[in-house]
Amino acid sequence: MHWQRDGKDWPHREHSRFVQAGGLRWHVQVFDGGAPPGVTPPNTRAPVVLLLHGTGASTHSWRDVAPLLAQHHTVVVPDLPGHAFTGMPPRGAGSRQLSLPGMARAIAELMKQLGTPPSLIVGHSAGAAIAIRMVLDQLASPRRIVGINAALMPLGGLAGQWFSPAAKVMAALPLIPRLFAWRAQSPAVLAQLLQRTGSVLDAHGTALYHRLVSDRDHVAGALAMMANWDLAQLARDLPKLTVPLDLIVGARDHTVPPADSQKAMLYLPAHSRGTLTVLPALGHLAHEEAPDAVVAHLPRLTGASVAALP
């Protein structure tokens, strides 16, 4: 995607900046603890909340959550590598930076460059897996992690055997992202994609996803991420997690089975097993459907007011 063309009316454009870190050109939005954009907040020690979107999304996914948290926090919201306005790694679709450990390290490099070590990491879907990998690999030391419809369990059966190889083939063929982006220009195709999430978005949210999935570079980045993804090792490493993990689940999620969150909790050691909260009326994009409802659970999930995080 091109910032001058596609970013003219991007949500919270005034908070956007472009940063070089870890060999990547990042698009990242920074909300400085309630201060106006570009103004250093009076409380320079405001706790940092890192928000990580899932595969195929972008900073826009947090457009309503970030301002709510930014009333008392410094909130950092990046586009993942190859997504939206963050560049692809120099080595392209086969780069290690698009693997789960690679993305975790790349985001850690970004946070180091920004000087914003997170006190809380909130990840949606694959973003939750990245957050956990960061902690497991000692790349971040948050007080807690919160996963929203977290994609933590590997696919089972034939789907699990064929998913990554198929994604690798598609990511390696330049024609595939172009074809997908061309097909996704149809409102009917996008409607089917969103229907599969179990979520109902407003017109603005739908239009933003239309812009993303119609862009061949963004589609190529999402396919490359899927091609390099391996959740089997993450599942094996969950018993080693050293910080509490809280999970928020939309009961209508058709993308990540809600039962996967229950299963993930069983893998965790007792000291890291946080709260599992089910939101009955929401789907995979719960934080976009009902940002207030999701944010309202964060203080309870963290055991105190979110503003009390050190």
Image (tube, rainbow, N blue to C red):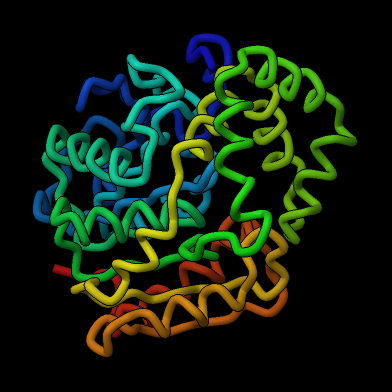
Q: Is residue 190 left or right of residue 249?
A: right
Choose between 120 and 245: the one closer to the eye.
Answer: 245
The image quadrant of residue 20 is: top left
Quadrant for the C terminus, please.
bottom left
The residue at 24%/71% (across/down) is 241
Choose between 281 and 9: the one closer to the eye.
Answer: 281
* Residue with the most extreme bottom position: 270
Quadrant for the N terminus, please.
top right
Q: Is residue 74 visible?
A: yes
Choose between 78 and 220: the one closer to the eye.
Answer: 220
Q: Is residue 276 left or right of residue 122?
A: right
The residue at 74%/24% (across/down) is 180
Q: Position of residue 267 (x, y in %)?
A: 37, 80
Above or below, 22 against 270 in this view is above
Q: Is residue 190 left or right of residue 298?
A: right
Q: Is residue 67 visible?
A: no
